[in-house]
Amino acid sequence: QVQLVESGGGLVQAGGSLRLSCAASGSIFSMPMGWYRQAPGKQRELVARIVTGGSTNYANYADSVKGRFTISRDNAKNTVYLQMNSLKPEDTAVYYCNALWEGINYWGKGTLVTVSS
């Protein structure tokens, strides 16, 4: 079983930056990891995903965050990050960390990001 704990959320003005962290309870070396978000009244959506293939990390992003957000991972620290720049009010949501392991999706409890205009 994988336990995920997110941190780094908060209140920021539009145009600002935040870095979210997701600490996993065990090794994440071979796990696809991702960040999702859910805004009030909306469905949860994929923000960014990262997969390690050999020594290379492959990342993909939602169109709405391309060029502004960067996902990264530190396998030695069992941690995944989401660097968020040029934040917009529409980025306001609860952000969830996700890990896929042996066909099971694991989720953290989420961290709230609020972007004021």
Image (tube, rainbow, N blue to C red):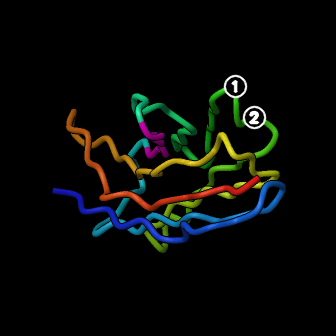
**Crowdedness near tag 1: few (<14), some (14–19) or many (≥20) residues, C-alpha within 10 Å:** few
Instruction: Give coordinates of residue 74: x percent, y percent.
Output: 55, 65
Q: Is residue 85 above or below residue 44?
A: below
Instruction: Tell me if label 1 and label 2 are in contact, CB under 8 Å.
Output: yes
Which residue is farthest left?
A: 1
**Crowdedness near tag 2: few (<14), some (14–19) or many (≥20) residues, C-alpha within 10 Å:** few
Q: What is the count of numbered marks?
A: 2
Disc 1 on helix, strand or loop?
loop
**Gap between marks 1 and 2 measured at Cα:** 5 Å
* Quadrant position of residue 29: bottom left
Please give the label number shown on residue 12: none
- Which residue is pictured at 47% across the width and 51% down the height? 95
Please give the label number shown on residue 66: 2
Q: In the picture provided, is 7 more to the left or to the right than 26?
A: right
- Which residue is pictured at 79% across the width and 55% down the height? 14
Q: State which region is magenta.
A: 33-40
Q: Is residue 45 above or below residue 35?
A: above
Residue ID for mark 1: 63
Choose between 40 and 18: the one closer to the eye: 40
Choose between 109 and 103: the one closer to the eye: 109
Residue type at numbered disc 2: Lys
- Which residue is pictured at 51% across the width and 47% down the height? 93
Residue type at numbered disc 1: Asp
Disc 2 on helix, strand or loop?
loop
